[in-house]
Image (spheres, grey):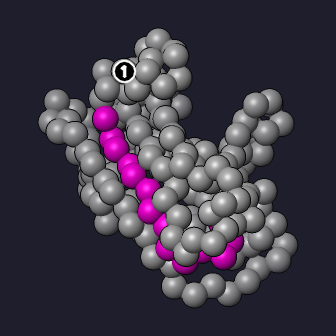
Amino acid sequence: MKEKIISEINLDLVFQCNNFSQFSNKLKDTKTNLIFESIFWEKVFLSWINTILKNEDYELPNYIFDKKSFSLGLQIISNQEIASLNKKWMQKNGPTDVLSFPIISDESLNNLDHIELGDIFISLEMALEQSYEYKHSIYREMIWLASHGFLHLLGWEHNNEHDLENMLNFQEYLITRLD
């Protein structure tokens, strides 16, 4: 594994979170409240970008590795909103847990210093349901979904079981780097 030293990375994060006061009784602890703060997500994504940029062995587009400035959007939305996006853009009915809309797609970005990665949408309601189903915290589930969406923004796909397993393993690796 080749690891390199990187200089400071800039991240422009556009964060939006709907009012989810109806879930306030389920979202009581301090750690959970972090998922509603822009500065928390900025630190998370910066950590992941730094982890990825320090190692060129990852299967990502080459033009990612020499960039110093990134931007992306993260929105925490309702089931109704994500179902609407899912129908419009994925032609699928019903809500899903996370949707990503990558912008980077070709090597014409090689000459740019700044890359707009795209947008991630996470359904808080689906994340809550899945946190109960998988018996872990909403904090853990939101981090998991954000990492999945983030990897899609970087070009990861999972068109077969092998690719999905690799992606899920890498998500776990990124999450452990946060601790």
Residue to which mark 1 is pinned = 84
Q: In front: 153, or 160?
A: 153
Q: Is residue 42 visible?
A: no
Q: Is residue 14 above or below residue 102?
A: below
Q: In front: 40, or 100?
A: 100
Q: In front: 69, or 76?
A: 69
Q: Position of residue 91 (x, y in %)?
A: 52, 16
Toward the top, the furthest residue is: 93
What amino acid type should be assigned to the residue bearing mark 1? Ser
**Magenta-drawn stretch contains 23:** no
Q: Quadrant of the N terminus?
A: bottom right
Q: Is residue 87 above or below residue 151?
A: above
Q: In percent of the image, x 34 and y 44: which residue is there?
A: 75
Q: Is residue 113 visible?
A: yes
Q: In percent of the image, x 41 and y 39: which residue is there?
A: 121
Q: In percent of the image, x 40 and y 26: which residue is there?
A: 85
**Magenta-drawn stretch contains 66:** yes
In screen coordinates, is 62 left or right of 45?
Answer: right
Counting the numbered discs, the total is 1
Q: In percent of the image, x 51 and y 85: which residue is there?
A: 8
Q: Position of residue 71 (x, y in %)?
A: 44, 62
Crowding near pointer 1: few (<14 within 10 Å), some, many (20+)? Answer: some
In screen coordinates, is 173 left or right of 56?
Answer: left
Magenta residues, dominant SS class: strand
Q: Position of residue 58 (x, y in %)?
A: 77, 61
Q: Which residues are magenta?
A: 64-77
Which type of secondary structure does the marked residue at label 1 adopt? helix
Q: Position of residue 142 (x, y in %)?
A: 43, 44
Q: In front: 44, or 81?
A: 81
In screen coordinates, is 92 left or right of 36?
Answer: right
In the picture, residue 21 is in which quadrant? top left
